[in-house]
Amino acid sequence: MLLARLKSLAATAASIPITLLGLAVVTFFIGRVVPIDPVLAVVGDRAPADVVARARIELGLDQPLYAQFWRYLTDILSGNLGRSVMTSNTVWEDIARYFPATFELATLAILIAALLGIGLGVLAATRQGSWVDQAVRVFCLAGHSLPVFVLALVSLLVFYAWLGWLPGPGRQGIVFQDMVEPVTGILTLDALLAGDWPAFWDAVLHLIQPAGILAFFSLAYIARMTRAFMLAELRSEYVTTARAKGLSSMRIVWRHAFRNTAVPLVTVIFLTYAGLLEGAVLTETIFGWPGLGQYLTVSLLNADMNAVLGATLVVGLIYVVLNLMADLLYRLMDPRTR
């Protein structure tokens, strides 16, 4: 038993560097396939030919492809993701600046999505075929079908332009700009640490619309998967046995069926969270949210390949880490997978 566990842990540990190596290969060749010349992005389109040639040599782009990849790999291993042409900062500095905004937005969205999505999924499964079940299924269908940018624009039009209930795009009102000292980069938390309640509530109000949009699409998926998992469990033999013993419906649903459903749901929620952490490009762009998704978009439009490839690597690393955490939780919750 111990040997089997050690082999499993060794296989999991070995898969991480292999996955990261594959990610490095993919990002490297993306940087070479994309029809953008990184040299021209640095020196400009109107630079003299000798300046372009000298910059190409300095960047190592005159070397063979395998030599370029080795240099790229050694830079990554040493923690060097290059310098952004757009901001003149190192890519790590830019990511440290933009990622907390995405983390704040994604974390609130996944909390809302998980709580409401699981509840709606269980409710629909326990009332299969009823109007409640049909309403939840229509709601989930809308979450999968409606384009993100349409719902975001409608939300801004209704709640900001017409009703004036919520603030417009941005992470903070003009009055509160640079009023809170950045400690963690998470604006609501920094405002709380500073004891600035007006700035805190302003940050919360700016969070509502983008977080609500992301939560809507995420909870639609989580609710659909929860419903499917619960239906499979409710049809199983142990549930029939529990009903024959006279156990209450509430206990059967939450103590027995949902307990087994929670195991695969962990993977669903973690991967959904990873998707949100990569930066919801359309949502962040429409709401002017200064997060990783907007940083990636602006960098790509400005041909800033160091920023694009560095941020892509970080996104891939997030997926790997969260997938590993989901796998570990899966094993803790279900002893059979050990």
Image (cartoon, helix red, strand yellow):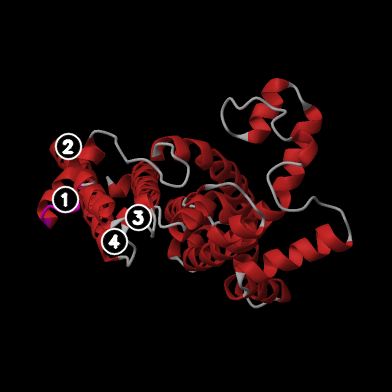
* Residue depicted at x 75% and y 22%: 195
Span of residues in magenta: 60-64
Q: In the rendered image of this protein, does residue 52 appear above or below residue 202?
A: below
Mark 1 vs mark 2, CA separation in Å: 37 Å
Residue placed furthest toward the right: 163
| Circle nearer the viewer, 2 or 4 | 4
| Element marked by disc 3 | loop
Q: In the rendered image of this protein, does residue 218 appear above or below residue 55?
A: below
Q: Which residue is mark 2?
A: 6
Q: Marks 4 and 3: in contact by CB < 8 Å?
A: no
| Circle nearer the viewer, 3 or 4 | 3
Q: Which residue is mark 1?
A: 68
- The x and y percentages for residue 295 are 50, 50
Mark 1 vs mark 4, CA separation in Å: 13 Å
Q: Which residue is mark 3?
A: 47
Q: Quadrant of residue 153?
A: bottom right
Residue type for callout 4: Ile
Residue type for callout 1: Gln
Mark 3 vs mark 4, CA separation in Å: 25 Å
Residue type for callout 3: Ala
| Circle nearer the viewer, 1 or 2 | 1
